[in-house]
Amino acid sequence: MAFISSGYNPEKPMQDRITDIGPQHFSKFLPPVIAKNKGAWDYHEIVEPGMLMHVGLSGDKVFTIRCGGARLMSITNIRELCDIADKYCGGHLRFTTRNNIEFMVTTLEDAKALKADLTSRKHTGGSFKFPVGGTGAGVTNIVHTQGWVHCHTPATDASGTVKATMDVVFEEFTNMRLPAPVRISMACCLNMCGAVHCSDIAILGIHRKPPIIDHENLDNVCEVPLAVAACPTGAIRPTKIEYQGKQINTVAVKNERCMFCGNCYTMCPAMPLSDRDGDGIALMVGGKISNRITKPTFSKVIVPFIPNEPPRWPTMTKVIKKILDTYAGDAHKYERLGDWANRIGWERFFEKCELEFSHHLIDDFRDPAYYTWRQTTQFKF
Amino acid sequence: MAKHKTPLLDQLESGPWPSFVSDIKQEIEHRYANPKGVDFQVPAECPDDLLGLLELSYVDGETHWKHGGIVGVFGYGGGVIGRYCDQPQKFPGVAHFHTVRVAQPSGMFYTTKFLRDLCDLWELRGSGLTNMHGATGDIVLIGTSTPQLEEIFYELTHKMGNDLGGSGSNLRTPACCLGESRCEYACYDSQELCYQLTQQYQDELHRPAFPYKFKFKFDGCSLGCVAAIARSDMSFIGTWRDEIRVDQKIVAAYVGGEFAPNAGAHSGRDWGKFDIQKEVVDLCPSGCMRYEGGKLEINNKECVRCMHCICVMPRALKIGNDRGLSILIGAKAPILDGPQMGSLTIPFIKAEAPYDNLKEFVESVWDWWMEEGKNRERIGETLKRLGFARLLEVTGTTADPRHVQEPRHNPYIFWKEEDVKGGWQREISDYRSKHQR
């Protein structure tokens, strides 16, 4: 391996330097039919699962084939997507916010051929490379975080839990038979870089053991005041201890105050939390983003803890499947999962989904907690 | 041949959903075969060692990535995230494995030329593994070494005309829905506004000067495909203030069963014949519609623009013509003070180039937050700590019932001295002249 220079001269970093240019303007990437009809679309229709038709005021039509993909993607996979886009779509494609890939063509015939081609491609292990679906009243791709693949704070893996879940709910990805869309999201710790807190179903990695304190190294790698200030419950205080005959600065943690958020670890690498028995999954349901019919809502914790069971997390996927099937069988048309639970009552939700209720599910974190308790005599037996 | 045995991960190769394990394996094979004779600038075994390290996490139930590490490119304070594995002897290919965030184009449309160029760059100078895309919206390139960072940046800017994204306490890479490019619901050009604000605030994006991260997200309508209302410090959500346009003939066609309701989104199950009363009128959250004598009437003044009726009959009902957007402030995930949804601050504002009205608003909000925000405090938390009224004051916004779900439950109003006749300075002797002790 010989170092190949890009042209950058480390002796003169400012020479010919280009900065602050941002992304390229999107207009350079639009397929011609999209560029032509931008801002002048009339209506759309979902022709079949995974196939959208948008019709312009001009009368132009564009057919979009949507397929799922793993967010963690190799360049070999991206090049295959490019080959497909070159063959059918004049060298254009797009990605959706939920990690789906969309190919656009201008005739139904091409759309059908493209769909057939995409669904015929499989990995050597047997899975689809590009399953078509994710439209309408069904489950679409799961947005997720890095997990054990590439993050320092996760309480579980992201790619694995997502793969295991999507395998179990796959039929709902390729069909449109649910009462409304169901958005599943995954975040591998409370930091939620994936912001799953408004999802129909949220898979969330959680820690349950307070940080271990690496006294020997803490003062060298952390700013003690920052570590102290990082704790939302004031559980961390500065202290001095004797270590190998020397007085050293470190911190002490009041364990019973710890809410296992990991914010201290974010500020101080000498306070790791992860633990094979402590870490696992919490499930949340009933959130939504859309303002359609009802207001945007937060997801609610309905299972406080499920152990990590790699590689396929069977307990977790069983609970998710049960919730999804119960909702599918019981909710009204257009009713989102949370709206269904609100209508039947959460006491009934737990009963129908055969979930255990425990004190862990009653909010006790600051002021908003009170607003989640029941201040009425209306309830169901 | 892969050098690590991965019996646990191998179990994730079966099942219908695309297997990331199979995909990484094909990259492993590709790198070892190296058909184009690429002189890899980071080890060829990167993906192989990544899979091996991940298998170890599946065995241990714990991550094997170390905490952070400050790396980057000259003059920028973000865009690269340092990452080192904690088992470098066993997995040398991922000993240094930094993340590079690349700014994505608005709406995430690409040409294959752009993607192929990016793949070539990442094959030469990185692991060959990516996220398409990261949660915030960037293209995420996973895994390279420190000496490659400037080289990658140089090639990105010089050959591809593209910049890095944001990380750290700065403006994060803004993201938008696909908007007017392929959606009839878009109430403004979310892609253009996203692009213009991204360009305007490059300095804020690359050089961290904020108390904490700050996210802009642009949704073309209230359905919220990029989840602006839940996860952006400042959400721009399209809306209109005149009337929903109705074509009664097409409404009748929906009622008559000529078109599938909800654009066919429910076609996988027999939900029975379309019932406009039950499926549209009765579900309207403000009860502003009625269907009588074959005619759909909408009392637009009472409409809250939830868009349900439009979604059910997209051929017949169209968004209004007097369009703009609403701005909400302060959404964030639970860390630290619990989750927050964006709070409506500007109910309606026009969104037309050059967007000076919007930039002025953005800057007034930032000025306040940079002055008052504590270290690592999201603006939503500043807002909770100092009160919503303060935000209205610093942005010169007049309080309006649209700002609240309902008025306050307590009378603990922070009156100001100038609100009260005669001010607050009083003499006890004057008081005593009327009131004995």
Image: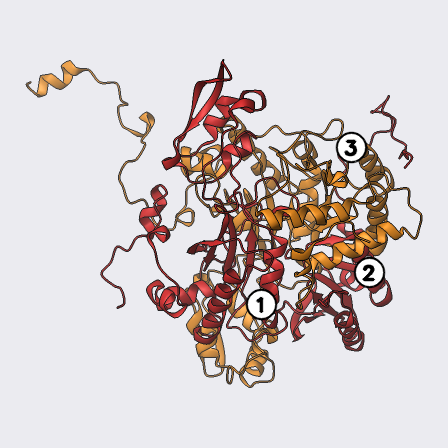
Chain colours: A red, B orange
Query: Is A66 rendered above or below residue B296?
Result: above
Q: Earlier in the sequence, mark 3 or mark 1?
A: 3
Assess disc 3: are there few (<14), some (14-19) or many (≥20) residues with their C-alpha within 10 Å of its C-alpha: many
Dot label at residue A282: none
Look at 44% across and 21% down and name the residue there: A238
**Which three-letter amino acid code belongs to the residue tagged 2?**
Glu
Q: Quadrant of the N terminus of chain B?
A: bottom right
Chain of the residue under the numbered disc 2 shown in the image: A
Look at 48% across and 81% down and name the residue there: B275
Residue named by callout 3: A19
Chain of the residue under the numbered disc 3 shown in the image: A
Dot label at residue A80: 2
Q: Earlier in the sequence, mark 3 or mark 2?
A: 3
- Residue A359: x percent and y percent? 33, 52
Q: Secondary structure at mark 3?
A: loop
Which circle, 3 or 1, is nearer the viewer? Answer: 1
Which circle, 1 or 2, is nearer the viewer? Answer: 1
Assess disc 1: are there few (<14), some (14-19) or many (≥20) residues with their C-alpha within 10 Å of its C-alpha: some
Residue named by callout 1: A168
Q: Nearer the viewer, residue A90 or B59?
A: B59
Disc 1 from disc 2: Cα separation: 26 Å
